[in-house]
Image (cartoon, helix red, strand yellow):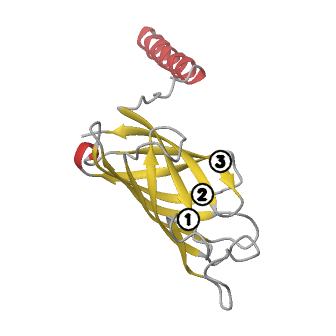
Amino acid sequence: MGARNSVVLVISFFMLFLALSSAFPRRKNQYKPCKHLVLYFHDIIYNGKNAANATAAIVAAPQGANLTILAPQFHFGNIAVFDDPITLDNNLHSKPVGRAQGLYIYDTKNTFTAWLGFSFSLNSTDYQGSINFIGADPILMKTRDISVVGGTGDFFMHRGVATIMTDAYEGEVYFRLRVDIKFYECW
């Protein structure tokens, strides 16, 4: 009977241990970025009158639409390419540290959203190389996250998350995005 009591006691302690360990779950790891940048890019869409200043152009539009005016109904079907200046602050006239190059596709019929695919090509004394971004942009949200999927140079094989925020806009011709980049994988 003594051996049986020992087994029951061991099993009881084991069950108590399991119950207590699951009652107090461990904290999840709070990852810290290995590198952090905040940059701004400035987009000026060609509207038929601003060819000298435009940094973006509509290259595809729904049938019958105009390539100098964004389509009605949430711009659905418009595809724009851009080659925008990147600055360290929110001033369009600050010295550029690189270029934001890529495209955005307005992809939803019932709200303002876009799909983004672009690179930051940086060429400054502080940073050399490119950072590649991809993801959905629900434009009406104050902040939204897109994936950082890689890079070159100082950003070789970097991955992370970029939180973008529309920092300013002027009608449908100009907008400025604040891009808060947090790298969680740095090589």
Q: Would you name the residue on which mark 1 appears?
A: 115
The secondary element bearing badge 3 is classed as strand
Q: Which residue type carries mark 1?
A: Trp
Q: Would you name the residue on which mark 3 appears?
A: 168
**Residues at marks 1 and 2, CA–CA distance in whole angstroms:** 6 Å
| Screen quadrant of the C terminus | top left
Q: Is residue 62 above or below residue 144?
A: below
Residue drawn 56% across the image and 49% down it: 177
Q: Is residue 99 above or below residue 46?
A: above
Earlier-in-chain disc, 1 versus 2: 1
Tell me residue 72's x, y (percent).
75, 76
Q: Are marks 1 and 2 in contact (CB under 8 Å)?
A: yes
Q: Would you name the residue on which mark 2 appears?
A: 137
**Residues at marks 3 and 2, CA–CA distance in whole angstroms:** 16 Å
Name the residue at the top extreme. 2
**Residues at marks 1 and 3, CA–CA distance in whole angstroms:** 20 Å
Circle nearer the viewer, 1 or 3? 3
Tell me residue 176's x, y (percent).
58, 50
- Left or right of residue 131, residue 145 in this image: right
- Left or right of residue 97, residue 187 in this image: left
